[in-house]
Amino acid sequence: MDKILIPRGLQRTSFWNFLLWIIPWIALLSLGIYAIYLCLAEGLFHTNMDNRFAFGIWIFLDLTVIALGAGAFFTGFLLYILHRKELKAVINSAVVIGLICYSGAILVLAVDVGQPMRAWFTFWHPNTHSMLTEVTFCLTCYLIVLLIEYVPIVLKNRQLRQIPKFLVFEFELHKLMPVLAGIGTFLSFFHQGSLGGLFGVLRGRPFAFREELGIWPSTFFLFVISAAAAGPSFIMLTTLLVEKITQKKLVKPEVYKFLGKVSGTMLIGYVLLKSIDTLIWINSTSPGNGFPAFEFYATQSFGSWILFTEIVILGLIPALILLSSRLRENRKLLFGAGFLVCSGIMLNRFVMTIQTLALPTLPFDDFLTYSPSWEEVATFLFVIAYGMLLYSFTFRYATLFPQERELSLLNGELSSQEFVESSKQKSSWQPKFILNLINKFASSKL
Amino acid sequence: MFPWVYEFHWTAFHITFLTIFFLIFAAVVATVILAVRRTQRAEQLHTMESIQWHSDFEDLSPTARICRHELSGNVQHRMCDQGFDCRSCLVHPLLVAKQTKTPMLQFEVHGFTMPPHRLYHRGHMWVQQENDGTYKVGIDDFGTRIIGKPYSVELPPVGSRLSVNGKGMLVKRSDANIRILSPIDGEVIEHGDSEKGWYLKVKADNPENVMTHLLKGDEVPNWITREMDRLQISFATSGVGATLADGGELVSDFHRHYPKADWDGILGQMFLEA
C-alpha cells in the first residue's frame, strides 16, 4: 500500500502489520495528550509534586533522556570530527534518537513549568545567575541543530529524493555536517555539564552538593562524561532492539564492538572520577556541611546499596566487560554490559533528583515520599510513545542504517568483505541459479 | 538579557555569554543559508544531475562500487571513489600505464552479446562510435534481459543535453521505473523507438575524452561476472535464497518467469539507483 514510500531494496513489514504496531503507541500518545492537557489547562495540582518535592518523575525523565540522547552528539563528534567512519552505520539512528530525547525532554519541561505560553521569558528575561539559563539556551540551540541534522534523513526518502532540489539540498547540507557536529558537541558539553553544575549551588542539600573545581562543581564533569559513556551504549541497545523487532541485520558486528569500546573507555574514566568524587564527598564535603555522609543512607529504602550498585554493579563491571576485546566478542555480554551502563545512568539521575529531595536536611524534616500521579506517568509514557512512533516512521520510510541494504543482500550470512573475497575466487560464474529458478517456477505451474 | 532589553549589564560574563550564544546561533543559521545558496548555484550551473548521481553513488553497496581495475585484475582490491568517472581519477592513468592485458575478442560473455567494438558503462549502457563521428548509445544485453518488456520508455528529446551519469532514459514497467544513466556528455541528435530499438544518437561534447571512463577489453567479461553475482544476491533477498551457481545462461525477459521478486529493488541495484 505504501511501497512507493519505502526505500528501494529494503524489506519492510506489510502496511497492515505496521498499522497494528503503531496503534497501541497512538493510544498511549492520546492518553499522554489528555494528561498534558489537564496539567496545562487546569494546573499542576494534577501532579503529586509540591513546593517541597519539586523534582518528580518528569525531571528524572528529562535528565535521563538527555543523558541517553548524548549518543547523537558523541557519535557525531567521533564520526565528523575524529573521522571514525565505522560510525556512519549508526549516525542516522543516533540523530533520530537524539531528536526524540531532546524534543521529548523540552516538551516535558514545558509541561513541568506549567506556563508554556511564557516559555519565551527564559530567553528575554533570563536569570543570568542560573546555570539552567545556559541549559535552556544550549538545549534550544541543540534541538535546532538536531532538527537540521534530521532534515537530510527525511529528504532522502524515496519520493522526496525524486525532487532534484531536495536531494541537492540534502547533499549540500550533508557536506556541512562537520560544522553542525562541532556546534552540537560544544552545546552538548555545556548543557550536559550545566545540568550537573546545578548541584554546585544546592548548598541546602548536602547529599547532592559538590564543591567547585575552578568555576564548576565536580558534577559538571561527571554529567558530561557519564552521558558520553551512556550515549553509545544506548545506540547499541536501540539498534539491537530494532534488529530483534524487525528480524533484520542492520549493522555489522564491528560497529557494535566499537560502540561498546567507546562506551567502556568513557565509563571507566567516569567510574574513576565518580569514586574519587564520592570519597571526597564522604570525607570532606558532607561532614563540612554538618552531615556525616552515612546518615544519608540510614533510610532503609535508600541504603548504601544504591551507591554500591551505581558505582560497582552498573559502573565498574560493565566498564571492564566493554574494555575487554575478548568479552566484547560475546554478544550477550556486550549487550548485557550496555544495558547495565544505561541502567547506571538512570540510577544516577534518579539519585541526583528524587533521592536528593526525599532525604531530610533539617532536624524537623521527615523523609519525604513521593509517587507520581497518573497524569505524570501518562506524560512520561507520552514521550516514549512519541519516540516509538517517530522512530518507527523514520525507520520505515527513510534509510536509518546504511548497511542494511548490503547486509540484506548478503542475507546476513556473509560480510561484505567475505563476499568480495568469495566472488573474486570464482573463476567463472555460471548462473545456474537463474535456470533453477525458472525450472522451479515452471514445475510449480505444472 | 540582550543589550536592548531588561537585565542586561555590560559585564564580562554577560558579554562573553552573549557573544558565544550569538556566534553559535549565527553559525547554525549560516550553515543552512550556505546549503540553500549552494543548491541554488547547482541549479544555475546545471550540476544538479551530477550531484544526484553522487548521492546515489554514495548509497551503492560496496560490491557495486568496485574499481574497474579490480575487474581487469590490475589491482587486488580497490573501491571507486569517483562516481565511475575515470576522467577525474588521478589513479586511473597510472593503472592504465601498468596494464598489460590483451583486449577482449569475445563476442559473448556468459551468454550475453557484448560486441567488442562497443564500450560499456557501469549502468548497463553501451557506446558505439559511428562513421559520421557521432556516438550511438543503448542499453546492453544484460540490461535488456533483466528489464524485459517495458510498457514505456522515455527518451530525451532531440536537442537535449546529456551528461555522464546524468539521466539518459527512463524505462517504465508495471512494477518499477528505472532511470538509466547516460554514458557520455553531449547533445541528442536522434533517437530510436519501439520499432527501431531504444537508442540515442549523440554528438559528443569532447570526442577525445569520451571513452576514458567506459569499460572495454577484458574488463567486460569480469564485470559481467560480477554483475551476475550481484544479480544473484539481489534475488536472494526476494525470498529465493542464495544458491551455488555452476552453469547456465540468463534467458531473455526472465523477469516474466519470476513476477513475485522485488523487481523494483533488483533493478535499482543493477542500474545503480538508490
Image (cartoon, coloured by chain):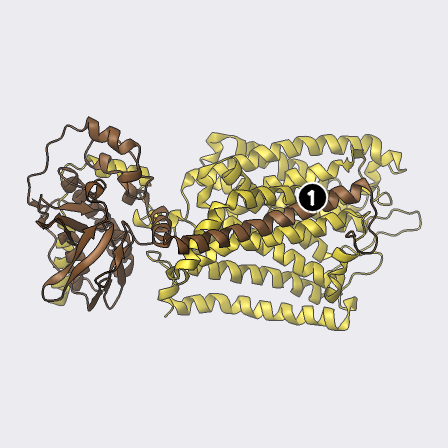
Chain colours: A yellow, B brown
Disc 1 on helix, strand or loop?
helix
Q: Residues within 10 Å of mark 1 (few under 14, many from 20)?
A: few
- The residue identified by callout 1 is B20
The type of residue carrying mark 1 is Ile
Task: Name the one closer to the observer, A131 or B233.
Answer: A131
Residue at the limit of the structure toward the right, as seen here? A364
Q: Which x, y percent locates residue A421?
A: 26, 35
* Snapshot quadrant of residue B78: top left
Q: Is residue A6 left or right of residue B114?
A: right
Taking depth in this image into account, of A232 and B215 the one nearest to the observer is B215
Residue A66: where, in percent of width, then height? 64, 50
Residue positioned 28% across, 42% down in the render: B85
**Which x, y percent locates residue A236?**
50, 45
B132 or A310, which is in the foreground? B132
Q: Name above or below for residue A420 compared with residue B243.
A: above
- One can see residue A446 in this view: yes
